[in-house]
Image (tube, rainbow, N blue to C red):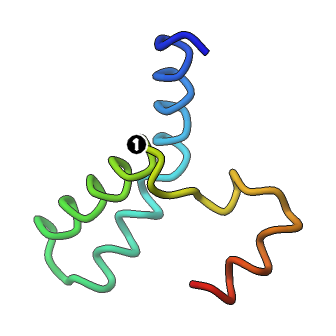
C-alpha cells in the first residue's frame, strides 16, 4: 500500500475513533491535558502497529480479546 493511501486510511480511522478514545482517557485521568496525551499515545501505537482496535479485528477474534484485556 502506498504511503499516501496508508495515511488516508489512518486519518479516516482517527476521525472515526478519536472522540471515544479521548472520552475514555478523560474518564480515567480527569485531566484534559493528560487525556490529550493519552489519546495521542493510543493513536501512535495504532499507527506503529502496536495496537489493534476491535472493529479492525475479525469478529471471531473479538471474544478472545475481551478476555485478554
| Label 1 sits on residue | 48
Identify which residue, 27 or 7, lies in the foreground: 7
Q: Which residue appears at 80% of the width and 68% of the height?
A: 61
Q: In which quarter of the image is the N terminus?
A: top right
Above or below for 60 versus 42:
below
Q: Which residue appears at 50% of the width and 33% of the height?
A: 10
Q: Which residue appears at 44% of the width and 54% of the height?
A: 50
Decide if residue 30 is on the left or right side of residue 10.
Answer: left
x, y percent for residue 12: 54, 32
x, y percent for residue 52: 57, 56
Decide if residue 17 is on the left or right side of residue 25.
Answer: right
Above or below for 10 versus 28:
above
Q: Quadrant of the C terminus?
A: bottom right
Q: Is mark 1 on a helix, strand or loop?
A: loop
Identify which residue, 48 or 25, lies in the foreground: 48
Decide if residue 20 is on the left or right side of residue 33.
Answer: right
> Hey, which quadrant is residue 54 in on the image?
bottom right
Above or below for 28 versus 1:
below
Q: Which residue appears at 70% of the width and 56% of the height?
A: 55
Decide if residue 38 is on the left or right side of residue 5.
Answer: left
**Residue at the farthest right position:** 60
> Hey, which quadrant is residue 32 in on the image?
bottom left
x, y percent for residue 62: 77, 71
Amino acid at each position: 500500500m502506498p504511503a499516501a493511501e496508508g495515511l488516508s486510511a489512518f486519518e479516516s480511522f482517527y476521525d472515526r475513533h478519536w472522540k471515544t478514545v479521548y472520552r475514555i482517557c478523560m474518564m480515567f485521568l480527569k485531566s484534559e491535558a493528560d487525556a490529550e496525551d493519552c489519546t495521542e499515545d493510543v493513536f501512535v501505537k495504532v499507527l506503529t502497529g502496536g495496537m489493534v482496535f476491535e472493529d479492525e479485528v475479525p469478529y471471531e477474534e473479538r471474544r478472545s480479546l475481551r478476555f485478554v484485556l
